Amino acid sequence: MDAMTSLALASGAFVGTHFLLSHPLRAPLVKALTPMGFMIVYAVVAFGTLGWMSQAFKHAPSTPPLWEVGEAIWGTVTLVMLLASLLLMGSLIGNPALPGPAMATAPTPRGVFTITRHPMMWAFALWGVCHIAVYPIVANIIVASAIIVLALVGSLLQDAKKAVLQPDMWPAWAARTSWFPFAAIASGKTRFGGFRPQDWAGAIVLWLAATWAHIPGAGIAAGIWRWL
């Protein structure tokens, strides 16, 4: 098996096992193994397929970039990654999509949830798009596309599952928010705002730290570090 085929299979396994374990196989495995047993299996499979994908990526050949990456692309990606950082950090607290006690009623959207009801998933999807934009080689496109599919298809599947599990809350939450970023604001369902100070502070710290880490980690100056 050549390295690129191995990478494609590893990426497909990473995404496919996440979907299978999170949806059709979750209930029977929880019943058979107990919730703790299921979580152990989930973690082993997730880290195993992630490790396979990582190793396959390291051994994949470096192909010529599919397009020239100029300063305009870098500037756009830098701003989009700040938005992705905000979506991620703002989603860590008060997120109805995260595991936890079911909410009795739908909360009023605020902060990142005025942008999308799946801010964490869209943060990962935007990460994937940005990394394709600035590093358009075949191996990176395979890996980043897998992350995009996992995030966006996963969020749609989560909508369907939550609507069944929380029929009194989730449909109302979905009616006040949007799957696609900024659609609820554009349609007048909600108003942009309500961010907490820690949302912005955490986003800026993450944005600066993650982009700086590309210098020692990959030998590439990313984000604002390209111009400093």
Image: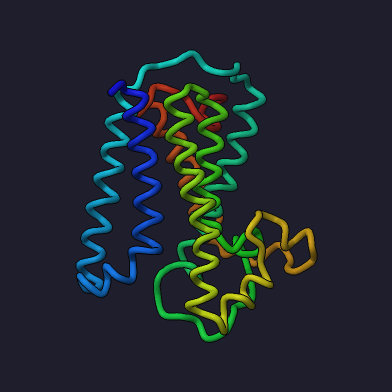
Rendering coords of residue 130 (x, y %): 55, 35
Which quarter shows the C terminus? top right
**Which residue: 35% across, 30% down?**
7
In the image, residue 130 sits, relative to residue 134, either above or below, namely below
In the image, residue 105 sits, relative to residue 160, either above or below, namely below
Rendering coords of residue 59 (x, y %): 29, 22
Rendering coords of residue 8 (x, y %): 38, 32
Which quarter shows the N terminus? top left
Can residue 210 be seen here?
yes
Q: Is residue 119 left or right of residue 21?
A: right
Residue 98 figure quarter: bottom left
Rendering coords of residue 99 (x, y %): 40, 70
Front-most of residues 118 and 8: 8
**Which residue: 27% across, 31% down?**
55
Can residue 216 be seen here?
no
In the image, residue 121 sits, relative to residue 13, either above or below, namely below
